[in-house]
Image: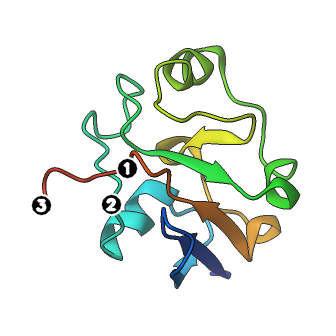
Amino acid sequence: MTKITVHFVSSDGEQTLSAEASEGDNLLTVAQIHDQPLEGTCEGQMACSTCHVIVETADFDKLPDASEMEEDMLDLAAGARRTSRLACQITLTAELDGLTVHLPIESHNMQIG
């Protein structure tokens, strides 16, 4: 199984956590395992936008296009930008090794305080 490195940049831009994952892992799950403040209230069912991340521009074009349903949820996300995606919809592939995502300032996981 191919190992993938993902970089999570804190909402203030001052901290970066590098996490190792496996090809096929879901970005939301990886974030939660590494205590990143992405709630994922709907557990990946695209019924919320609590796993909203901002993907580094260089990595954004490596992702498949967002579905219409994901775009609709992103329209509701606070602080959404052109490179915003829902972490629950990103499946890690070898091409995404080194993926960098920024946590929006609005991110706060109510489950961990």
At x 62%, y 49%, the residue is 54
In the image, taking residue 100 as reference, residue 35 lies left or right, namely: left
Mark earlier in primary sequence (1, 3): 1
The one nearer the camera, 11 or 36, is: 11
Viewport quadrant of the C terminus: bottom left
> How packed is label 2: few (under 14 Cα within 10 Å), some, or many (20 or more)?
many
Identify the secondary structure beneath mark 2: loop
Residue beneath label 1, please?
107
Please, what is the three-letter code of the amino acid marked with disc 1? Ser
For the residues bearing labels 1 and 2, Cβ distance under 8 angstroms: yes
Q: Which of marks 1 and 2 is nearer the N terminus?
A: 2
**Where is residue 14 drawn, in percent x and y?**
53, 79
The residue that disc 3 covers is 113
Q: How far apart are marks 1 and 3 (CA)?
A: 12 Å
Residue 93: which quarter of the image? bottom right
Disc number at residue 37?
Answer: 2
- What amino acid type is highlighted by mark number 2? Pro
Q: How far apart are marks 1 and 2 (CA)?
A: 6 Å
Residue 11, position in %: x, y?
48, 62
